[in-house]
Image (spheres, helix red, strand yellow):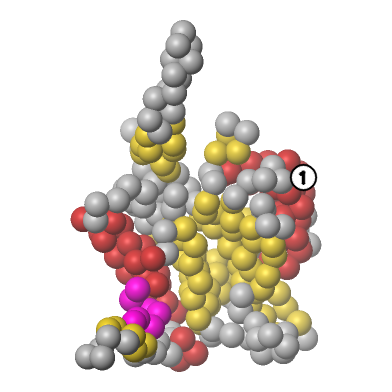
């Protein structure tokens, strides 16, 4: 599993993710054909889940099922880039092409993506943030009102999202008569958030998820270094990106 988050504010888009890859394995005795208990284990803490398509200045984050046809989704994404993208593509066209590519190859894969970038209309840079799920054949734009007329600012996440959801979303508390009362959380004013604060929030969200899962009695499915990519009308920049070393 994973945790990825995309924060979209007026001055830019921040995409962040952890680096842990966990796999579920089950040993089978070839003689007795007995199945042993299913075991979830960490296979790597050095997986790239957030990617930049440099020619199109578009970011893509991956979460969910990560091994497709015995190959990582990251490797398939590189193939997708080489085979399908042109310099004229943008977040809008890439989102649809990405869904078509993975749906054709792995129609039942429960793999999801965030796709984000900018597109100019009448000399104005318009932000686009999409969510895509292969198995459900789902593609939706996240940062737009229902009438498709107004850009929204906020945050969306995927994977092990229960930790950040408990922080941001309303909670329920049992009161004296035994009934439940909804307790609202103080709002975050995304529309007024500077880009630096969006960077800090994205790192906070991933790190808090990692630290909380570390202490909870649950599978350690989120961990490793944090990668952070920003996309803005003036260009893209890696704020944090793990590098190969020896």
Q: Which quadrant would residue 104 be assigned to in this image?
A: top right
On whether residue 208 falls in the magenta region, the answer is no
Taking 166 as reference, is 151 left or right?
Answer: right
- How far from the left and from the top, in percent, is residue 235? 57, 70
Residue at 40% in and 54% down: 18
Residue at 53% in and 44% down: 66
Observer-nearest of 183 and 215 = 183
Quadrant placement of the C terminus: top left
Taking 193 as reference, is 53 left or right?
Answer: right
Please, which residue is most extreme toward the front here? 177
Q: Is residue 83 visible?
A: yes
- How far from the left and from the top, in percent, is residue 16? 45, 62
Q: What is the total number of numbered labels drawn onto the structure image?
A: 1
Q: Which residues are magenta?
A: 166-172
Q: Which residue is mark 1?
A: 104
- How far from the left and from the top, in percent, is residue 163? 34, 66
Please, which residue is most extreme toward the top here? 31
User: Above or below — where is 208 with respect to 24?
Assistant: below
Q: Is residue 117 visible?
A: no
Taking 176 as reference, is 203 left or right?
Answer: right
On whether residue 171 falls in the magenta region, the answer is yes
Q: Which quadrant would residue 51 be assigned to in this image?
A: bottom right
Observer-nearest of 160 and 124 = 160
Residue at 58% in and 43% down: 73
Secondary structure beneath disc 1?
helix
Q: Residues within 10 Å of mark 1 (few under 14, many from 20)?
A: few
User: Above or below — where is 145 with respect to 30?
Assistant: below
Residue at 42% in and 77% down: 198
- How far from the left and from the top, in percent, is residue 7? 48, 74
């Amino acid at each position: 599993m994973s945790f990825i988050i995309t924060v979209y504010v007026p001055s830019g888009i921040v995409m962040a993710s952890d680096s842990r890859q966990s796999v579920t394995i089950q040993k089978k005795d070839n003689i007795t054909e007995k199945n042993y208990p299913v075991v979830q284990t960490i296979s790597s803490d050095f997986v790239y889940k957030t990617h930049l398509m440099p020619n199109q200045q578009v970011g893509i984050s991956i979460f969910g099922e990560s091994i497709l046809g015995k190959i990582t989704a990251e490797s398939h994404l590189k193939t997708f880039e080489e085979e399908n993208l042109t310099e004229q593509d943008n977040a809008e066209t890439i989102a649809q092409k990405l869904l078509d590519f993975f749906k054709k190859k792995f129609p039942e894969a429960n793999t999801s993506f965030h796709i984000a970038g900018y597109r100019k209309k009448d000399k104005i840079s318009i932000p686009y943030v999409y969510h895509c799920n292969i198995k459900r054949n789902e593609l939706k734009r996240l940062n737009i009102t229902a009438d498709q007329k107004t850009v929204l600012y906020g945050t969306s996440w995927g994977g092990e999202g229960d930790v950040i959801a408990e922080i941001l979303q309303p909670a329920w508390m049992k009161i004296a008569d035994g009934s439940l009362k909804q307790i609202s959380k103080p709002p975050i004013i995304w529309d007024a958030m500077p880009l630096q604060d969006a960077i800090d929030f994205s790192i906070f969200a991933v790190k808090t998820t990692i630290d909380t899962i570390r202490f909870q009695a649950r599978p350690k499915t989120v961990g490793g270094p944090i990668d952070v990519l920003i996309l803005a009308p003036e260009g893209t920049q890696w704020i944090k990106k793990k590098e190969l070393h020896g």
